[in-house]
Image (cartoon, helix red, strand yellow):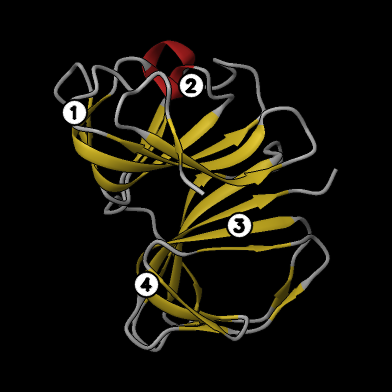
Amino acid sequence: VWLPLAETPGGAVKTLFVGRAAGERTRLVRVPAAADAVALLRDALDPAIVVVAGALAGRDGERLDAGDVLQPTADEAAAWRPAAACTLLVVERGGAPGSRRARRTRVDAPGWRPLAPGTEVLPVAAGRDETTEIVLLRMAAGGLLPEHEHTGLEEIFLLGGSCHCQGTRLVAGDYHRASGGSEHHDTTTDEGCVMLVVLRKAA
């Protein structure tokens, strides 16, 4: 269900996930081109912000397009504005504002590494000290993500293309969530796809 954003006339928000810990949530946000600032980003707790459609522009002239990921500090978040009407996926990890350095990850950046036949990953926020790991995952046509068990809650958001996941065909814009301890059968794709994968580790 899309709800209006009071602080952003013409904007709307859809909540996809709310965790047990304070500040853990995943939301889709629609921001009109006429918005002065992306107000919602200022109160987000340790967010990773993915451009789903449209673009964001920074004060320094930098632009983030579909598939790019912004991890801003609290101060930096207010500097980003929609360059055009945009849809954002906001993954909040519940950390204190300013708890990490600002970072931008472009979907076409180098550093993709093979994970399985026809499947590559690009870490966005990953490592031993991360309570929430985030990666971009890219599958070529005919690619495979082998079956695996989820050690924590897993969220998938399709940014482009399509795949077959747990007996369901997912297309760009679809969201899938699997609980910790569940088993994930092979994920396959006929045409190829790009997705954001969020793993919220079990406490």
Q: Amino acid at mark 3?
A: Glu
Q: Give the mark toward the camera: 3 or 2.
A: 3
Q: Secondary structure at mark 1?
A: loop
Residue 62: mark in rendering: 1
Residue occupying the point 42% across, 10% down: 75
* Residue under numbered circle 2: 101
Q: Amino acid at mark 4?
A: Cys
Quarter of the rendering occupied by the C terminus: top right
- Cβ–Cβ below 8 Å for labels 3 and 4? no
Measure the C-alpha gap from mark 4 to mark 1: 26 Å
Q: Give the mark toward the camera: 1 or 3.
A: 3
Res. 127 in view = no
Q: Position of residue 193 (x, y in %)?
A: 37, 72
Q: Position of residue 65 (x, y in %)?
A: 23, 44
Which quadrant of the figure has residue 35? top left
Residue that sits furthest to the top in the current view: 75
Residue 155: mark in rendering: 3
Q: Nearer the viewer, residue 69 or 82?
A: 82
The crowding category of the residue bearing disc 2, from other C-alpha atoms within 10 Å (few below 14, some 14 to 19, many at least 20), is few
Residue occupying the point 34% across, 23% down: 8
Q: Amino acid at mark 1?
A: Glu
Which quadrant of the figure has residue 62? top left
The crowding category of the residue bearing disc 1, from other C-alpha atoms within 10 Å (few below 14, some 14 to 19, many at least 20), is few
Q: Which label's residue is closer to the chain start, 3 or 2?
A: 2
Q: Position of residue 69 (x, y in %)?
A: 38, 41
The crowding category of the residue bearing disc 3, from other C-alpha atoms within 10 Å (few below 14, some 14 to 19, many at least 20), is many
Q: Judge left or right: residue 3 versus residue 172.
A: right
Name above or below for residue 113 compared with residue 7: below
Q: Which label's residue is closer to the chain start, 4 or 2?
A: 2
Residue 90: mark in rendering: none
Measure the C-alpha gap from mark 3 to mark 2: 24 Å
